Amino acid sequence: MPIYPISISPNDYSGTDTERINQAIQTAATGCGHVTIPRVNVAGDGARNIWLLDSAILLPSDITIELQDCHLKLSDACRDNFFRSANCGLGVQTIQPLSNIHLLGVGNPILEGADHPRATGDSAKTLGANSYGTDAGRAGESQTGDWRNIGILLASVENFSIHNLTIIDSHCWAISLEYCAHGILRDIDFRSAGNKIIDGVQQTLLNQDGIDLRQGCRDISIENITGYTGDDLIALTGIPHAAAMAGELASTMISGHNSLPVNERDDICRIVLRNIKGYCQGGHQIVRLLNSSGIRLYDIIIDGLLDTSPPEVQCYATVRIGDANPKWGGVTPLGDTFRILITNVIGRSRHHILLAGSLTDSIIANMICHGGENEPLTLQSGPEMASNVTLSNVVTSLVKYARE
């Protein structure tokens, strides 16, 4: 029986940095299942402290990637993810389930966007007109964002973890999960502002959410999140669109979209958010819950949410539930968003808890609201869209403290 090493290093392979890392993963997948990306990149052109990626690192089942105080950066030639589950990609119409995928940071590993991103923003954003991208106007290249702009993209993965990362200047959502279950994301710091100085000019980079849980995500914990993002820090979004095949570039969702009606598989449920300390530099939401068109969102716990925005930034909402905009499917019927527990919150957003959709059988408790313009709970969609919702232990204050 062969004896496998404890871990595989990409420094033992040749080629581009991406090729070397993917070769190490392919070797590990047949043996020890563990790859270490070290701080020092010993390449053919000498040693350096950066790994430059020109395409995505692909993650199969039963793999652990240890990011050992390393710095991974997207190259200016890259229009792809940092990491993507190996079951999905361009033209892959059937996404087979994977399991046991782990990204574990040791020390201070960093994932950083390109100096000159080829594309930024989601699939509704036109390059150049809405969001920066050097592919703007380039023949043969998609002129909108898509799922390739996501930093870490997992689809149909069970039993996974993402631990201890700093993600800087993401090209779109930093982390996005689709139809994933039984996982944990923790100790992740975001540093994206919605814009970036490129060649001396401030450029707009839209849709820089931190973490997005999309259709079909369940049984997931998100803990110890810090920093700031250009868009929502954390979003749980189940928004079906027109039917589309998986692997197409017309969407930011690599799994495609089922034709309506949706079913139980599409629901987002049993999610815990705990110890969230951050804000949205772009002035949107810190946490957003959004479902529509029959996708249900339920059994969600938000416990410990601290708005850390500086005086010059005010988020629109600390927590926003639903949306009346027809673009997002309009207000959900009573009973589609239910059993939400929000507790232990300190915020200074314009709206503290904004109910823009419906909410049933839920509790909001233990809040300190300061600096905002509205009541602790804003019923934007009307009181008739809140049923059996209790609000308790709330302190509000408009006092300006000397050092705020």
Image (tube, rainbow, N blue to C red):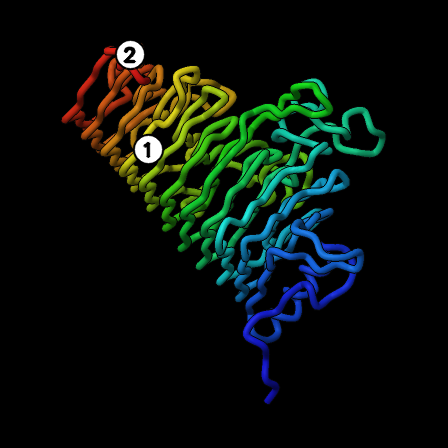
Out of 326 and 322, give the one closest to the viewer. Answer: 322
Picture quarter containing residue 74? top right
- Left or right, 125 with respect to 371, comes to right
Question: What percent of the width, then of the height, locates residue 226?
Answer: 41, 37
Q: Which residue is denoted by mark 1 in the rendering? A: 337
Residue 235 visible to the viewer:
no
Picture quarter containing residue 27? bottom right
Out of 279 and 298, give the one closest to the viewer. Answer: 279
Determine the secondary structure under disc 2: loop
Q: Is residue 297 above or below residue 346?
A: below
Out of 155 and 262, give the one closest to the viewer. Answer: 155
- Left or right, 327 with respect to 399, comes to right
Calculate the distance from the C-alpha at mark 2 to the C-alpha at mark 1.
Answer: 23 Å
Q: Residues within 10 Å of mark 1 (few under 14, many from 20)?
A: many
Q: Residues within 10 Å of mark 2 (few under 14, many from 20)?
A: some
- Residue beneath the point at 73% across and 66% down: 13
Inspect the image, locate mark 2, and give the three-letter code of the amino acid beneath it. Answer: Asn
Question: What percent of the width, then of the height, locates residue 272?
Answer: 32, 44
Q: Which residue is denoted by mark 2 in the rendering? A: 374
Q: Earlier in the sequence, mark 2 or mark 1?
A: 1
